[in-house]
Image (tube, rainbow, N blue to C red):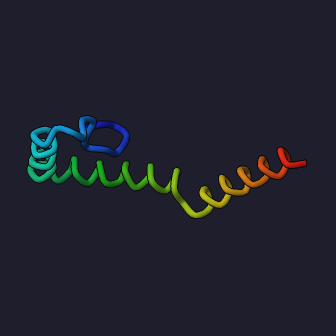
Amino acid sequence: MLGNGFALDDYANPDAFAEKINYLLDNPEAASELGKTGRKYAVERYSWERVANDLLRLFDGIKRVKQ
């Protein structure tokens, strides 16, 4: 498993996908940790607060360019 909360690093390989799913099914503790890490990753990068702040910075940059 990757340390960033993702189970795959080769998305085009269905055998690798099946292997990772089987590993997670056989190792519920690893699946739980992977889920926690993945949730943390998503919250840090895609929370509404983060998205809103990113949009505000984008709009501010556009506004400055047009002035």
Q: Which residue: 14% across, 49% down?
A: 21
Q: Nearer the viewer, residue 14 or 50?
A: 14
Q: Nearer the viewer, residue 59 or 3?
A: 59
Find residue 19 and report its image quarter: top left
Q: Which residue: 25% across, 43% down?
A: 7
Q: Residue furthest front?
A: 66
Identify whether 44 is placed above or below 47: above
Q: Is residue 13 left or right of residue 6?
A: left
Q: Which residue: 37% across, 40% down?
A: 4
Where in the figure is residue 24, as x and y percent of width and height? 16, 49
Where in the figure is residue 27, as x and y percent of width and height? 13, 48
Q: Is residue 45 left or right of residue 40?
A: right
Where in the figure is residue 16, as x and y percent of width and height? 14, 38
Find residue 11 and report its image quarter: top left
Q: Residue furthest right?
A: 67
Query: Exactly how many numbered labels are in the figure?
Result: 0
Q: Which residue: 85% across, 47% down?
A: 64
**Quarter of the N terminus within the rendering:** top left
